[in-house]
């Protein structure tokens, strides 16, 4: 259902997460990683609980020299 590297989110909300592993044994489980502050967190979710989202564009910071 999902591919490694895609950005997903729980259908109920929460932070954007990156797919790191997709179950191939018929369990339909997707493993994701995301940041909670500066700490990375990783967890497996049933794929039916997730939806694909568009990643946020990178922020550009202008520095005056």
Image: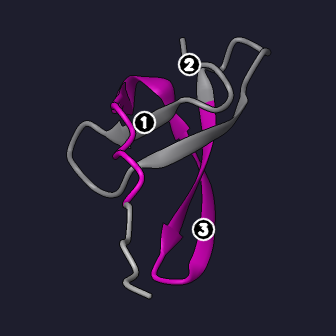
Q: Residue drawn at (42%, 52%), measured in percent from left and top? A: 58
Question: As displayed, is residue 56 above or below residue 60?
Answer: above
**Which residue is denoted by mark 2 in the rendering?**
2
Q: Quadrant of the C terminus?
A: bottom left
| Image location (x, y in percent) of residue 40 | 62, 71
Horizontal placement of 10 versus 4: left or right? left
Examine the structure image and report whether residue 36 is included in the region drawn in magenta.
Answer: yes
Q: Disc 3 on helix, strand or loop?
A: strand
Element assignment for label 2: loop
The answer to which of 61 and 18 lies nearer the viewer is 61
Q: Residue at x 40, y 81 (%)?
A: 63
Q: What residue is at 36 percent from the left and 41 percent from the top?
A: 9
- Count of picture labels: 3
Residue drawn at x 78%, y 15% as measured from the top left:
24
Q: Which residues are magenta?
A: 30-59
> Quick check: marks 2 and 1 in contact, CB under 8 Å?
yes
In the depicted structure, whether residue 60 falls above or below residue 1:
below
Instruction: Classify residue 6 by image quadrant.
Output: top right
Distance from label 2 to label 3 (Cα)? 19 Å
- Label 3 belongs to which residue? 41
Magenta-drawn stretch, dominant element (helix, strand or loop): strand
Q: Is residue 62 above or below residue 7?
A: below
Q: Residue 15, position in %: x, y?
A: 35, 57
The answer to whether mark 2 and mark 3 are in CB contact below 8 A is no
Query: Of label 3 and label 1, which has the lower sequence position?
Result: 1
**How is the rendered protein coloured?**
one colour
Quarter of the rendering containing residue 10: top left
Numbered mark located on residue 8 in the image? 1
């Amino acid at each position: 259902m999902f591919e490694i590297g895609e950005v997903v989110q729980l259908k109920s909300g929460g932070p954007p997460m990156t797919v790191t592993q997709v179950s191939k044994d018929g369990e339909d489980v997707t493993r994701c990683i995301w940041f909670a502050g500066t700490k990375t967190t990783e967890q497996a979710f049933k794929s039916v609980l997730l939806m694909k989202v568009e990643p946020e564009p990178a922020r550009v910071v202008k520095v005056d020299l």
